[in-house]
Image (cartoon, rainbow, N blue to C red):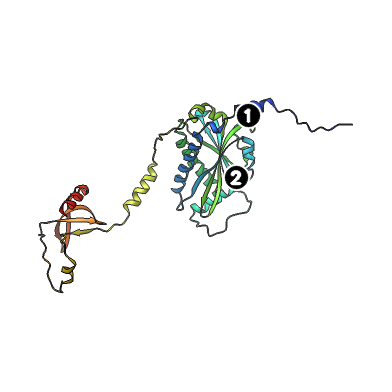
């Protein structure tokens, strides 16, 4: 007669060694800083591709086995495999179904009025193409964020809809998993980044201290877009030939037909203003029956302010 016992089999010594070698996130304060930058940079890049303004927030940063992290997204996400030559490793980035469906609607002009997609169909070719485009943007965001501690390039290799095919080392190997939440048009979705511990181990010392000075690398495309929008902004300007102070009694005594004499002459310079801010001195002229202004000098606003104060 066989006797059943509740004793568990002894743990595999190899798993114990891997767990011992795993990085302690509490001792790596730079990792949350870096992944916050990943979310910010990726948000800026997505905003250049859509009219809406999606927001990305780092939701959690945990230590997990690669297989356990991937199993949570089986048949419900698109995963991208990236090669990082400087680390001699591969990492995995993934988007869940809600993430893909929301961004498809955002990038094609949706406003959230249509009900969200809830069926369990396979991803369409358009959605797969969009995912590959987003993976390329994630690679640039990772490269920029990790530039604080290392000069590494993230090369996108392939995408997988079968999560168990997204290999980045042994499934029982420890890894760092960053999960992001995306919000747009009153919807959301999840993005995850899985980095094997072996890739980050050489950076342990650098990641254990906070880098206070960030090397700002502005995005030239975003700067150009802002510049173009600013240049298209409409402003009102006015030309002031002369200004004279009157009392309220003087104004109340004005009569229809009364002439107000100005000290200005055709040779006097005209002040060009916008929103009551002096901009230029100009000369009054005429062309084809219309009054014209020829810019003569840029007004030093600081000196002009001093002059106005002294004249009071």
Q: Between residue 87 and residue 238, name the one nearer to us.
A: 238
Picture coordinates of residue 212, whole percent (x, y):
42, 34
Picture coordinates of residue 20, whole percent (x, y):
62, 27
Disc 1 is placed on an element classified as helix
Q: How many marks?
A: 2
The N terminus is located in which quarter? top right
Is residue 98 shown above or below 147?
below
Residue depicted at 66% across the width and 27% down the height: 16
Give the label, 1 or 2, closer to the camera: 1
Q: Is residue 206 left or right of residue 300?
A: right
The C terminus is located in which quarter? bottom left
Marked residue nearer the N-terminal end (1 or 2): 1
- Which label was assigned to residue 77? 2
Is residue 43 shown above or below 269?
above
Residue depicted at 57% across the width and 58% down the height: 115
Q: Is residue 296 visible?
A: no
- Which label was assigned to residue 19? 1
Marks 1 and 2 sit apart, C-alpha to C-alpha, by 27 Å
């Amino acid at each position: 007669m066989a006797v059943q016992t509740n004793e568990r089999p002894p743990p595999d010594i190899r798993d114990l060694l891997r767990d011992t070698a795993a990085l302690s996130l509490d001792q790596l304060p730079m990792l949350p800083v870096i992944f916050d930058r990943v979310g910010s940079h990726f948000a800026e890049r997505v905003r250049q591709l859509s009219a809406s303004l999606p927001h990305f927030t780092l939701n959690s940063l945990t230590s997990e086995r690669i297989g356990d992290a991937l199993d949570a997204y089986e048949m419900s996400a698109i995963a991208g495999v990236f090669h990082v030559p400087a680390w001699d490793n591969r990492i995995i980035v993934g988007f869940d179904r809600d993430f893909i469906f929301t961004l498809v609607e955002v990038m094609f002009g949706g406003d959230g009025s249509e009900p969200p997609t809830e069926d369990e169909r396979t991803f369409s070719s358009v959605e797969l193409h969009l995912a590959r485009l987003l993976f390329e943007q994630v690679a640039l965001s990772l490269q920029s964020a990790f530039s604080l501690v290392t000069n590494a390039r993230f090369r996108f290799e392939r995408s997988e809809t079968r999560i168990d095919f997204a290999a980045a080392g042994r499934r029982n190997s420890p890894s760092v998993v960053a999960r992001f939440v995306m919000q747009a048009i009153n919807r959301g979705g999840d993005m995850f980044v899985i980095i094997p511990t072996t890739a980050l181990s050489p950076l342990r010392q650098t990641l254990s201290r906070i880098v206070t000075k960030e090397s700002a690398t502005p995005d030239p495309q975003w700067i150009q877009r802002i510049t173009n929008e600013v240049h298209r902004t409409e402003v009102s300007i006015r030309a002031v030939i002369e200004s004279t102070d009157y009392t309220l009694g003087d104004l109340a005594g004005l009569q229809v037909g009364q002439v107000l004499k100005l000290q200005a002459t055709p040779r006097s310079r005209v002040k060009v203003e916008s929103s009551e801010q002096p901009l230029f001195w100009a000369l009054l002229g005429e062309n084809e029956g219309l009054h014209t202004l020829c810019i003569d000098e840029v007004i030093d606003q600081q000196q002009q302010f001093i002059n106005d104060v002294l004249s009071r």
